[in-house]
Amino acid sequence: MNDKNQDVWIYGVVPAGASLEELERREGLPDVWVVEAGDVAAIVGNAPQDDEKATRNQALAHARVLEAAVVDAPVVPFRFGIMVPGDQQVGNDLLDAHHDDLAEHLKTVDDHVQMTLKVYYHEDEVLREIVESEPEIAKLREAMREGPEDATRDVRARLGELVSNAVEQRRQRDSADILERLKPVAQSAVVEGLEREFMVLNIPFLVARDRQEEFEDVVEEVAQERQERMRFRLLGPMPVYNFIDVEEPAWA
């Protein structure tokens, strides 16, 4: 339970009485407890001390607690950093004051999880493919190898531009193909920004719980077909971070 001298950290909201057995099963999670009010409940814990390391550790803990909770129940995830003075304020100022909105959010996320797919090109393979299919790029690469660095500055710039365009063309084509394959087994998707140059796509999917295994099977099938050119990384299940937005309540 809460140390009276320490703020309470809010992870997210679940239905009151929800089974949260995975929170107890998983090792390495921070101590958390549930504060209930009516038919909604908040997963809370002691806030970290005000230092850089504690805050960094809490960022990891925040995601891990929510991902454990979503195994057993629908979860409305709260954004990182929401704190209140104690359990009573959680009940009064959050759950009671915003009960109807939170209940509606829970209804929205009920029976759904988020699965985030990240796909990356194998850099050497896609570059080989580009050189073999683009004669101008092949010529520029040869010219760059034969001349001194100063004399080939313009060649390098042109080569970089052409390679970047070629990668982008393939990315657009490949990401569209992958999305088309996954569309039938997902409710919706959100295109996120790419994290590195040779990333193909970074997309959270909203998936019905009862179709999660089917979704994973299709991802595995698509990944196997493209394993020579790409690496697939599937994260989840997790709360529907990208499909619901809960702002910090106005505390009384």
Image (cartoon, rainbow, N blue to C red):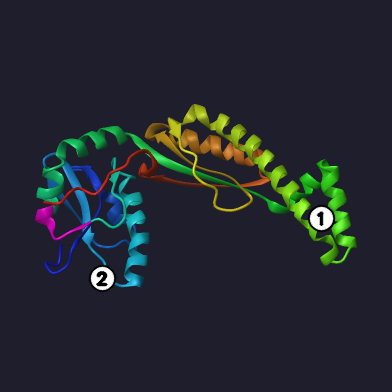
Left or right: residue 6 versus residue 76 is left
Q: Secondary structure at mark 2?
A: loop
What separation in Å lies between label 2 and label 1 (alpha carbons)?
A: 54 Å
Q: Residues within 10 Å of mark 1 (few under 14, many from 20)?
A: some
- Residue 15 in view here: yes
Residue 118, horizontal then vertical, whole percent: 54, 46
- 3 to 175, vertically: above or below: below
Residue designated by label 1: 155
Judge by depth and name the residue closer to the eye, 247 or 67.
247
Q: Residue furthest right?
A: 146
Residue 197, horizontal then vertical, whole percent: 62, 52
Q: Using the image, tell me which numbered label, if any, was put on residue 49.
A: 2
Residue 238, horizontal then vertical, whole percent: 38, 46
- Residue 228 in view here: no
Q: Residues within 10 Å of mark 2 (few under 14, many from 20)?
A: few
Q: Which residues are magenta?
A: 83-89
Q: Residue at x 13, y 69 (%)?
A: 5
Q: Using the image, tell me which numbered label, if any, was put on residue 214.
A: none
Indicate whether residue 84 is drawn in magenta. Answer: yes
Q: Residue at x 36, y 54 (%)?
A: 63
Left or right: residue 103 versus residue 227 is left
Left or right: residue 98 versus residue 193 is left
Q: Amino acid at mark 1?
A: Val
Indicate whether residue 64 is drawn in magenta. Answer: no
Q: Amino acid at mark 2?
A: Gln
Q: Residue at x 29, y 54 (%)?
A: 23
